Image: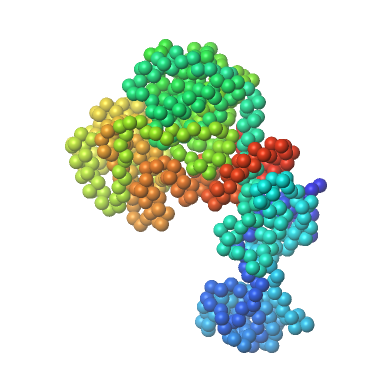
Amino acid sequence: MNMALRPVTDLKGVGTAMALKLEKLGIHCLQDLLFHLPLRYQDRTRIRAIGALRPGDECVVIGEIKTADVLQGRRRSLLCRVQDGTGTLTLRFFHFNAGQKNALKPGLTIRCFGEARPGPGGLEMVHPEYRKQTEDGLVAVAETLTPVYPMTEGLQQNRVRTLIQQVLDELDDQTIEELLPASLRAQWQLWSLADSLRYLHQPPADADQTLMLEGKHPAQRRLAFEELLAHNLSLQKVRLKTREQGAPALPLHNTLVTQFLAGLPFTPTGAQQRVAAEVAQDMAQPFPMLRLVQGDVGSGKTIVAALAALQAVENGAQAAIMAPTEILAEQHYINFTSWLEPLGLKVAWLVGKLKGKARQEQLASIVDGSANVVVGTHALFQEEVVFKDLGLAVIDEQHRFGVHQRLSLREKGRNGNCAPHQLIMTATPIPRTLTMSAYADLDCSIIDELPPGRTPVNTVLIADTRRNEVIERVRAACAEGRQLYWVCTLIEESEQLQCQAAEVSCEQLRETLPELRIGLVHGRMKSAEKAAVMAQFKAAELDLLVATTVIEVGVDVPNASVMIIENPERLGLAQLHQLRGRVGRGPVESFCVLMYQLPLSQTGKERLAVMRQTTDGFKIAEKDLELRGPGEVLGTRQTGDMQFRIADLQRDGDLLGRVRELAGQMEQFPQQSQQLVWRWLGRGEEYGNV
């Protein structure tokens, strides 16, 4: 067996109990130990003069014990006064035994390591590590920087250092296999894996600690590079596997598409036409399209989806449109019905709440093919849903489903023998670094142009203490004929509490503004009720709509030009950006008022400042990634996907271009590619696959 894959129990001093503790750190084999990198380093290579110490210094001192006394205070402690000719330092031990007390006698020379802190009688070190002078009078110091590792309960730093030292003593290019071919390492100027690991566990005394703390040292970059490469190769493998399955070639015939475009009250933007052409070209191929379409709020992704659906239908296939929430699915159903029924097509509808006879009718129309297009939620995943001939799956806001479900609709294509084309849409701009890593199995298109007539939204920050002022502004805006949203948020995840908060706000606003027509929408209302209120708002029969974040996506009321968001500091930047996108959809100047609660945290201030400074969804997404991390932004934090051991998408994003290029070159080395994926992802391989 490869030495690196041997279990930790092969190491001296590791029994069952120790193995269980190491398991909590994700350490099962010797390779895991090597990849358990230090958080920081201590410099024990130089001896500092006691007289030169400053509070906060973490260092080695050597001195002679002058006094050693047990102090009987509120906490019993052992105090040793140590001198080296330049000054005096107190060593304080709260936990000690009789043997320790007897060993630390006056006249003994010891080497100590610890942090100097201010104490009652000058500087002191609390529970320093110490070693006595050897018989030959020498006190050894470390030759390399001392690593400080991430820990778990019941483990000590010295124990982990000893175990890693055992592995390092055997480490060379054979014991941990070098999987990157030498020619490619030379081309990309990469350190060897063994050299990188040895350096990071035992950096020389003159190593650049600042560079290492920032994760920018070539040894760290070598490991991050390999880990990012493994993730990329894994997703490329998923892509190849999907493509091998084959898909129906659905060429563009243009009859229905031309009729549809003629019926629209506007001409699609250049960006919409460009992306639609990319999608049409993909769908004409005999292997599955895997395309991610990103477009900021209001850029018109649904039109692109409709054009793709018509292309599928013209070829006798069915199209499925899947949305993460019932309210967004309803919005899609309304749009697709109004667009496609005049063309003689049938749109079916399937969500979890649809029961009994109505559900059976919809299922029957899907299986016999009379439903050309099917709109629904994750209910489309269910086993009982059988398509006659699914040619296209459109997944809207896919990150809300979790990465695991990304490819699950493919089994619905021709009884699993032929994969449907997949069009994945998101209005949450995904930072370039995430697109290149989490979506490496997809082709990407961006609708980077807003339809004409859209006006930028002015964002205003106001403290909750000025609530009455905001209400008066609402009154004045409605008097001018404007319509407004009032969005209520709660930090609790509970939908029930959110709905209660919205109901309370609605009642208060009705009391304060009796002359206004005020409606309420929240997640616990029946769909028919929600739809009725939204229809009233869209028809300008309501002045003010009080809502929870259910209106985040899919609601389009061009006359609504003002949005007030309560407690915006409780939402992620992407969600705030989505909400703000509900206004500014008409020609009138629009405003978004972020009414925050004091005091604001530093992060809260940063996030709200970003919202005020820019309406660029990609800049907002980059900041969101920086503040919340990739798991949160992708919606995968709970599933364990995209969990990197060493790489950091923020810090190492600049490597992704080279990683993608090297992934292409690794096609010549299939065995090493597979081993790389196994090394870094193990059984989590193909996390995009289902």
Q: Going 69% across and 48% down the picture, which residue do you hit? A: 185
- The image quadrant that residue 219 belongs to is bottom right
Instruction: Give the colour scheme of this rendering.
Output: rainbow
The image shows residue 393 at horizontal and vertical percentages of 52, 25
Q: Quadrant of residue 340?
A: top left
Residue 59, quarter of picture: bottom right
**Residue 334 left/right relative to 118:** left
In the rendered image, the quadrant that contains the C terminus is: top right
The one of 123 and 72 positioned closer to us in this rendering: 123
Q: Position of residue 261 (x, y in %)?
A: 39, 19
Front in this rendered view, residue 592 or 452: 452
Taking the spot 78% from the left edge, 82% from the top edge, the residue there is 135
Residue at 27% x, 26% y: name it: 539
Q: Camera-side residue: 143 or 394?
A: 143
Q: Residue furthest front?
A: 187
Counting every numbered tag in the picture gives: 0
Does 230 sit above or below residue 170?
A: above
Residue 215 x %, y % = 58, 56
